[in-house]
């Protein structure tokens, strides 16, 4: 597996911040984000269980352009 880097949160110091990648083999998005607070997790749990193998994270809205770019790349990769 190799991750294609798309960017980090532009409003941080570049270390320990939300980040976006695409897995070049599976075309999956790989996201690093802030851990959700207890209230956000509680709201998510109203829809269903959060398995141990999953996490609720937050990605700031200012990263939408990076997410769009990564989604477009992932979509193109799936079509190959």
Image: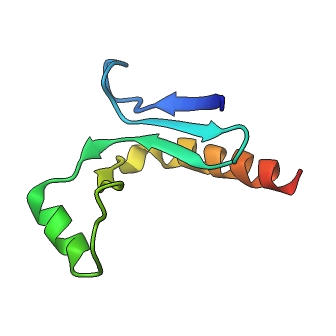
- Residue 29 spot, x, y in % from top left: 57, 47
Vertical comparison of 9 with 55: above or below: above
- Residue 59 spot, x, y in % from top left: 36, 48
Q: Locate residue 69: give its quadrant.
A: top right
Q: Residue furthest left?
A: 38
Question: What's the coloring here?
Answer: rainbow
- Residue 24 spot, x, y in % from top left: 71, 37
Vertical comparison of 10 with 52: above or below: above
Residue 50 vs residue 39, the one in the foreground: 50
37 sits to left or right of 21? left
Q: Residue furthest right?
A: 80
Where is the N terminus found, in terms of image quarters?
top right
Residue 79 vs residue 11, the one in the foreground: 79
Residue in the picture at 29% in, 79% down: 48
- Residue 45 spot, x, y in % from top left: 22, 74
Residue in the picture at 10% in, 59% down: 38
Q: Residue furthest front?
A: 52
Q: How many marks?
A: 0
Residue 26 vs residue 7, the one in the foreground: 26
15 sits to left or right of 30? left
Q: Locate residue 3: give its quadrant.
A: top right
Residue in the picture at 18% in, 63% down: 40
């Amino acid at each position: 597996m190799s991750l294609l880097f798309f960017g980090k949160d532009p409003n941080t110091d570049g270390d320990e911040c939300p980040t976006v990648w695409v897995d070049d083999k599976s075309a999956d998005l790989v996201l690093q984000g802030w851990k959700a607070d207890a209230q956000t997790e509680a709201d998510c749990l109203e829809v269903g269980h959060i398995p141990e193998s999953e996490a609720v994270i937050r990605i700031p809205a200012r990263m939408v352009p990076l997410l769009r770019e990564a989604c477009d790349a992932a979509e193109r990769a799936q079509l190959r």
